[in-house]
Image (spheres, helix red, strand yellow):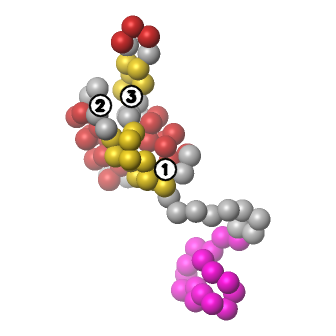
Amino acid sequence: MGNTGDVHVPAGADVHDLTGHTVIPGMMGLHNHMYYTGAAGRAAQLSFSAPRLYLGTGVTTIRTTGGRSPYAEINTKTAIDEGR
């Protein structure tokens, strides 16, 4: 990103005209959970929806701070790394 004439765009680069928009780097979440706790101690693991919700709000990296199902979170990381 930069002013015209100040930045060399490599051949074949993906170019987007985002005039009028704000562009920021991905944000990092340092205290995140991939589960939801409801009434009476009930909880739901959100391995499918949580990563998509974080990404949809601009958070591209999270550090989970405890989970109800730690192996589910490890499996989610593996699925993301595999492009699933």
Residue 47 location, quadrant = top left
Using residue 39 as the reference point, say whether residue 13 is left or right of it: right
Residue 69: numbered disc: none
User: Residue 45 in magenta?
Assistant: no
Q: Which residue lies furthest to the left in this view?
A: 71
Residue kind at label 2, given as amino acid type:
Gly
Residue 19 location, quadrant = bottom right
Front position in the image: 83 or 20: 20
Label located before the other in sequence (1 or 3): 3
Dot 1: element:
strand
Mark 1 lies on residue:
59
Dot 3: element:
strand
Residue 1 vertical position relative to residue 80 in the rendered view, above or below: below
Q: Residue sitting at 63 percent across and 90 percent down?
A: 6
Mark 2 lies on residue:
67
Residue 35: numbered disc: 3
Residue kind at label 1, given as amino acid type:
Val
Q: Residue furthest bottom?
A: 5
Q: Where is residue 84 in the image (x, y as percent from the top left)?
A: 38, 47
Residue 3 vertical position relative to residue 54 in the rendered view, above or below: below
Main SS, magenta region, reads loop
Q: Where is residue 23 in the image (x, y as percent from the top left)?
A: 63, 64
Residue kind at label 3, given as amino acid type:
Tyr
Read off the magenta span.
1-17
Q: Where is residue 82 in the image (x, y as percent from the top left)?
A: 32, 52
Front position in the image: 5 or 15: 5
The answer to whether the residues at label 3 and label 2 have Cβ atoms under 8 Å apart is yes
Residue 35 location, quadrant = top left
10 Å neighbourhood of mark 2: few (<14), some, or many (≥20)?
some
The answer to whether the residues at label 2 and label 1 have Cβ atoms under 8 Å apart is no
Q: Which residue lies furthest to the front in this view?
A: 31
Real-space CA distance between mark 1 and mark 3, rounded to the nearest whole angstrom: 16 Å
